[in-house]
Structures are given as C-alpha cells and as structure tokens.
Image: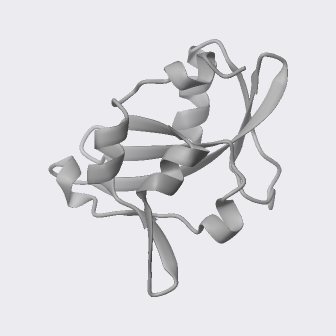
Amino acid sequence: MGELLALAKLNTLGLAAYVSPEGAPGHDLITIINGQPKSIEVKTRQFRERPTEISRWPVDLGTKGDADFFLFVELDLRTITPTFYLLSNAQARETNRVSSGMGNCYPGQVRKLVKPNDFSLLFIVS
C-alpha cells in the first residue's frame, strides 16, 4: 500500500512517477526529474496508535543500495493516512545500521534528518 500511496503523492506533486517493473533491482518507483529517471525505494511500516510504534524500516543496502532516493512511509492504520520521509541515498546510508546481517534505518534518526512530507529534495536535484 505504501508504494501506491507514494506513487499517488509524487504524481500530485506534478512529477511523472511510475511503478518499476516487477523484479526491478533496488527500487520500487521511478520518477522523472529534469528529464532524467530517478529510482525510489519505498519502505512502509504501519502503526495503530502512534508513530513511535515503528521501531525500524528494514533496508538491505546490498540489494537496494543503488536507489537514488529512499521514501520511508509511516502508515496510520486508523485513517490510512501516510506520513512520508524522503531521503537521498547518502542520507539513508547515514541512518542505516546492520545488525545480525540485516540492515535497518531507524525512525528517530530519519526524523532528525528530514521533515515529514518534505519532497523538496526532488526539486533541487540537478
């Protein structure tokens, strides 16, 4: 659901955004920025009462690390309202920690780096 909500959001911002072909390595969505395709990996976690219920977004940078952007979605199950956190590849790497062979990006660190629902990063990419 997070991917579809992200796709809708990107299109409402006036960006041409598309679902990547199934099995596309390292990303879920493609958006066109300044005439160039940019890949976006979408990770979604749901919560029932408060966003702090989300402890991590699993991200394997070994397979997903080539994405241009990472879009972390907090989905409120009571209202199906998403909150988006858009990070560059470098920012996602900054928040990623490997534990027991699996990488995770942690919401507290993500929230310190970027404002919720701020997509300005997509409009300043050259």
Residue plotted at (31% across, 51% down): 109
Which of the image's four quarters has the C terminus?
top right
Residue 61 horizontal/vertical position (percent): 61, 65
Residue 98 horizontal/vertical position (percent): 46, 75
Residue 74 horizontal/vertical position (percent): 35, 46
- Picture quadrant of residue 64: bottom right
- Outermost residue, left side: 49
86 relative to 80 in the view: left or right: right
Query: Considering only vertical position in the picture, is 51 above or below 54?
Result: above
- Outermost residue, bottom side: 100
- Outermost residue, top side: 14
Res 55 seen here: yes
- Picture quadrant of residue 124: top right
Res 80 seen here: no
Residue plotted at (34% across, 29% down): 115
User: 64 or 11, which lies in front?
Assistant: 64
Residue 81 horizontal/vertical position (percent): 34, 35
